[in-house]
Amino acid sequence: MAPAELIGHEELDGVAARLKLAVDASELHGSLCGYLSGGGRVGRDAVLSVLHLDGGEQVNPSAGDQALLENLVRQSEQELADPELGFEPLLPADDRPLEERVDALGDWCRGFLGGFGLAGPEKFGKLSEEAQEILRDLNTIAGSEFEFGDSGDDEDALIELHEFVRVAAMLLHAECVGGRNKPNSDTVH
């Protein structure tokens, strides 16, 4: 079976808009990744219910949108556990305006923190000092207001933040989930 094509930011943003979610694609992906990194499992439950992201008007996902969300869960689980460190936060393409990409990174971090908290706040006291520091740093990024100046320097700063966030998610996932995820887990197949 050929691997499924990776879900893109615009595609997921379309689903979020159709379902009238209060979050965009970046925050939705961040929420899911935070939940999974914190040890949460989606299983056969609907991902939006697990993440408490049901649309305000209770719009039910079409079969296509539901399949995309289920694929997003599998994609995110696989990427977070990838021994080749292939995980990427789902953010707007590099050709989008810098301000939009910076805002999306902040949204992704806010979502990640919310999802991580949903996975089990009782774990916070058991986290290593490094993991606790990572969560504090993600919180700082999520709450930051960015000022823009030299576009080259700003672009470099965004690349550094992006790389930090990417590695942070994988480190938290490794600490909280570690080797628990075996190929025959109870995730949606």
Image (cartoon, rainbow, N blue to C red):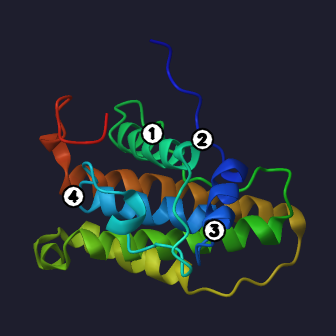
Q: Which residue is mark 4?
A: 39
Q: Amino acid at mark 4?
A: Gly
Q: Nearer the viewer, mark 4 or mark 2?
A: 2
The disc, 2 or 3, on the residue closer to the chain's N-terminal end is 2
Residue 159 appearing in the image: no
Label 4, label 2: how many angstroms apart (C-alpha)?
A: 22 Å
Q: Is residue 45 above or below residue 182?
A: below
Residue 78 appearing in the image: yes
Label 4, label 3: how many angstroms apart (C-alpha)?
A: 23 Å
Q: Could you tell me how many numbered marks the image carries? A: 4
Q: Quadrant of residue 35?
A: bottom left
Classed neighbour count for the residue bearing mark 2: other residues with Cα under 10 Å, few (<14), some (14–19), many (≥20): some
Q: Position of residue 162 (x, y in %)?
A: 59, 58
Label annotation for residue 24: 3
Apparent side of residue 37 relative to residue 8 in the rendered image (left or right): left
Is there CB contact under 8 Å for labels 2 and 1? yes
Label 2, label 1: how many angstroms apart (C-alpha)?
A: 8 Å
Q: Amino acid at mark 2?
A: Ile
The disc, 4 or 2, on the residue closer to the chain's N-terminal end is 2
- Quarter placement of the C terminus: top left
Is there CB contact under 8 Å for labels 4 and 3? no
Element marked by disc 4: loop
Q: Which residue is mark 2?
A: 7
Along the line of sight, the residue nearer the viewer: 38 or 146: 38
The disc, 3 or 1, on the residue closer to the chain's N-terminal end is 3
Q: Amino acid at mark 3?
A: Asp
Along the line of sight, the residue nearer the viewer: 90 or 152: 90
* Farthest residue, direction top: 1
- Quarter placement of the N terminus: top left
Q: Which residue is mark 1?
A: 75
Q: Is residue 102 above or below residue 174?
A: below
Classed neighbour count for the residue bearing mark 3: other residues with Cα under 10 Å, few (<14), some (14–19), many (≥20): many
